[in-house]
Image (tube, coloured by chain):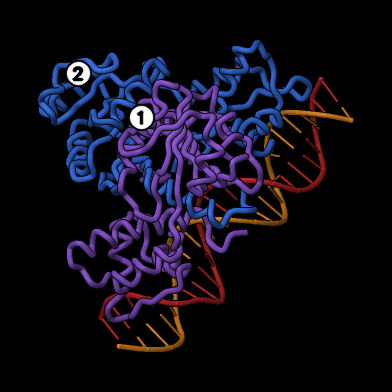
Chain colours: A blue, B purple, C orange, D red
DNA sequence: ACATGTGAAGTTATTCACAGCC
DNA sequence: GGCTGTGAATAACTTCACATGT
């Protein structure tokens, strides 16, 4: 049983991004209702989430942006940093490499893998591409604990097995299949087809019933 | 208030994919516990979800694969088909075009838009790319009701406004920001950074607390 | 006044458990 | 005996509402 639910963690990540933007704009303090307006949530929700990081608000000034941002980072980030590996350097994989490039210093994609030998050894978006065979070795050497699976569905389970056997404990899976993994491995599925079909359904039966989230 | 929750719709989409695969393998019947095993859910959950489509199972044979698949499609698909538009033909946009190409005949990306005039007129992955100025016109002509936003965060709100003003009622948003839209528009956010940070967090504080979902 | 922190209430989602049926 | 369909129970999540502080 986690001290913090997956939903709260996701919202904390969102708050941090917002707080970082506010900080860049020179804003020093925020109230929960302001954050709520920015996230589309309620003020009570924001305060509950912030409780999880050990709160710090004052009734007069709200929360100190910098401090709150720091405390959230204390929960989300590993102080020593974490490394991720991408498997599958196709269209989607390359887009992900570009997307995540230099976004968070404490969480970077440090290696890529692809079954195509033509890609091995190349550096794509600043990330070295290795053949699958080197996976165990590279993961150990870089201390990688997060795997991003962007291979076709046929290969996804095999890749997941390999990654977890090498010590990876969290997977971000873009393949449209449910991976079978051990109890100690966390999987987040991003199922693009399902998401699109959901949007299409509610676009059709639209009206009412506002928004939603990952 | 929807007759069917967003979570159930997402699972129905998943069941349909599984059923399609089973059908291809020549399987004629399934039990709820088999579907549950494939999805990582419980048998009771599967039966509840199936109730939403008007059930059809028999205690002896379980559910008829073909029939169930058809009934789910009756809920998820618009019999006349639905069209989607992609906005932002960068790395991610192109990957999405490739991904969704020819996946579902009842739900296809029929147009792409990009602010870069160099892309206008070109056909990318079988999809015609238009300048942003033609958005209203093309959306009306193609009867598009779903928009996929794959532009940088700065432009996302403006794109959402344009799409919804043109009549789009469902958005799949990849930009890391919460879009402000009318009550009658459904938004599904796919926030890649938040998802990755979530995985990283649980990879670290791993053990226990199994899987999760979109 | 107005915002925080939080127990209590409310809401939504999931699972249990059993009647009914092949 | 094992499965479906579903009311009832449980669990998870969200919102209310108010005591407290400034």
Q: Which residue is mark 1?
A: B122
In the rendered structure, the answer to whether residue A93 lies left or right of residue A115 reads: right
Splitting the image into 4 quarters, where does residue A104 fall? top left
Looking at the rendered image, the quarter that the N terminus of chain B falls into is bottom right
The residue closer to the viewer here, A74 or C1, is C1
Would residue A212 be visible to someone looking at this image? no
Q: Residues within 10 Å of mark 2 (few under 14, many from 20)?
A: few
Q: Residues within 10 Å of mark 1 (few under 14, many from 20)?
A: some
Name the subunit of mark 1. B
Image location (x, y in percent) of residue A11: 54, 34
Q: Are marks 2 and 1 in contact (CB under 8 Å)?
A: no
- Which residue is located at x 54 percent, y 45 percent? B140
Helix or strand or loop: what does disc 2 sit on?
Answer: helix
Q: Nearer the viewer, mark 2 or mark 1?
A: 1
Q: Which residue is mark 2?
A: A141
Would residue B89 be visible to someone looking at this image? yes
- Which residue is located at x 49 percent, y 36 percent? B173
Helix or strand or loop: what does disc 1 sit on?
Answer: loop
Splitting the image into 4 quarters, where does residue A78 fall? top left
The label number, if any, that marks residue A48 in the structure image: none
The residue closer to the viewer here, B114 or B142, is B142
- Which residue is located at x 17 percent, y 36 percent? A162
Image location (x, y in percent) of residue B188: 51, 42
Name the subunit of mark 2. A
Image location (x, y in percent) of residue A35: 65, 29
Residues at marks 2 and 1, CA–CA distance in whole angstroms:
44 Å
Image location (x, y in percent) of residue B212: 40, 45
- Which residue is located at x 70 percent, y 28 percent? A34
The residue closer to the viewer here, A103 or A170, is A103
Marks 2 and 1 belong to one chain: no
Looking at the rendered image, the quarter that the C terminus of chain B falls into is top left
């Amino acid at each position: 049983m986690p001290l913090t639910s997956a939903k709260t963690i996701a919202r904390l990540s969102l708050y941090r991004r917002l707080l970082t933007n506010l900080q860049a704009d020179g804003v020093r303090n925020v109230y929960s209702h302001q954050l709520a307006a920015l996230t589309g949530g309620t003020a009570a929700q924001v305060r509950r989430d912030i409780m999880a990081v050990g709160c710090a608000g004052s009734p007069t000034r709200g929360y100190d942006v910098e401090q709150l941002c720091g405390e959230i980072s204390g929960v989300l980030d590993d102080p020593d940093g974490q490394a991720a590996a991408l498997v599958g350097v196709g269209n989607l994989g390359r887009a992900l490499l570009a997307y995540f490039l230099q976004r968070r210093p404490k969480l970077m994609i440090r290696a890529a893998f692809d079954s195509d030998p033509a890609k091995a050894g190349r550096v794509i978006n600043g990330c070295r591409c290795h053949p699958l065979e080197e996976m165990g070795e590279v993961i150990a050497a870089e201390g990688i604990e997060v795997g991003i699976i962007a291979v076709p569905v046929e290969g996804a389970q095999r890749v997941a097995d390999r990654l977890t056997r090498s010590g990876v404990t969290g997977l971000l899976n873009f393949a449209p299949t449910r991976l079978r993994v051990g109890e100690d491995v966390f999987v987040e599925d991003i199922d693009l087809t399902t998401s699109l079909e959901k949007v299409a359904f509610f676009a059709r039966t639209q009206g009412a019933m506002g928004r939603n989230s990952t």
